[in-house]
Amino acid sequence: MEVRIGIRDVAREVAFESDNTPQQVRATVNEALASGAALIELEDDKGRTVLIPTGALGYVEIGAQEKGRVGFGTR
C-alpha cells in the first residue's frame, strides 16, 4: 500500500510503500497527533523507519492496497 505524506514548506512529499493496512497507518497517525508526540513513526515495506515531525505535517494520503497486475494492456 502506498503512503504519501505532505510536509509544510517542503515542495516534495514523502512517499513509500508499506505492508501495514490503511487502518494501522491511520491509527498510528491519529495516536501521535492526539498524544502530542513530536514525531510520527511509520515503517516501509523494506523495514526502514520513516519519522515525520507532527508539527510540520501537512497531510497523509493512504492508498488502497494494489493487486498485482499481469500483461501489457491491464489497468
Image (cartoon, rainbow, N blue to C red):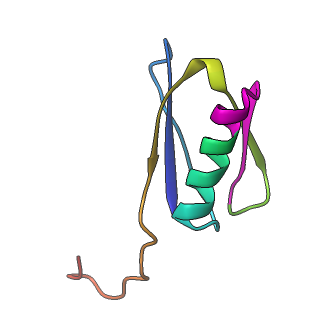
In this view, 18 is above or below 41:
below
Residue 41 lies, in percent from the top left, at: 75, 42
Using the image as rendered, state which of residue 41 and residue 45 is in the foreground. 41
Residue for point 68% across, 63% down = 45
Residue for point 62% across, 43% down = 29
Quarter of image, res 33: top right
- Left or right: where does residue 1 sit relative to residue 24? left
Using the image as rendered, state which of residue 31 and residue 73 is in the foreground. 31
Query: Farthest residue in the front direction?
Result: 34
Residue 58 lies, in percent from the top left, at: 47, 25
- Left or right: where does residue 63 sit relative to residue 17? left
Residue for point 76% across, 29% down = 37
Residue range in magenta is 32-44
Q: Quadrant of the C terminus?
A: bottom left
Residue for point 20% across, 82% down = 73
Query: Farthest residue in the bottom direction?
Result: 70
Indicate whether residue 10 is drawn in magenta.
Answer: no
Using the image as rendered, state which of residue 68 and residue 73 is in the foreground. 68
Using the image as rendered, state which of residue 42 and residue 44 is in the foreground. 42
- Left or right: where does residue 36 sit relative to residue 4? right
Indicate whether residue 43 is drawn in magenta.
Answer: yes
In this view, 59 is above or below 10:
below
Residue 39 lies, in percent from the top left, at: 74, 30
In this view, 6 is above or below 75:
above
Residue 54 lies, in percent from the top left, at: 65, 25
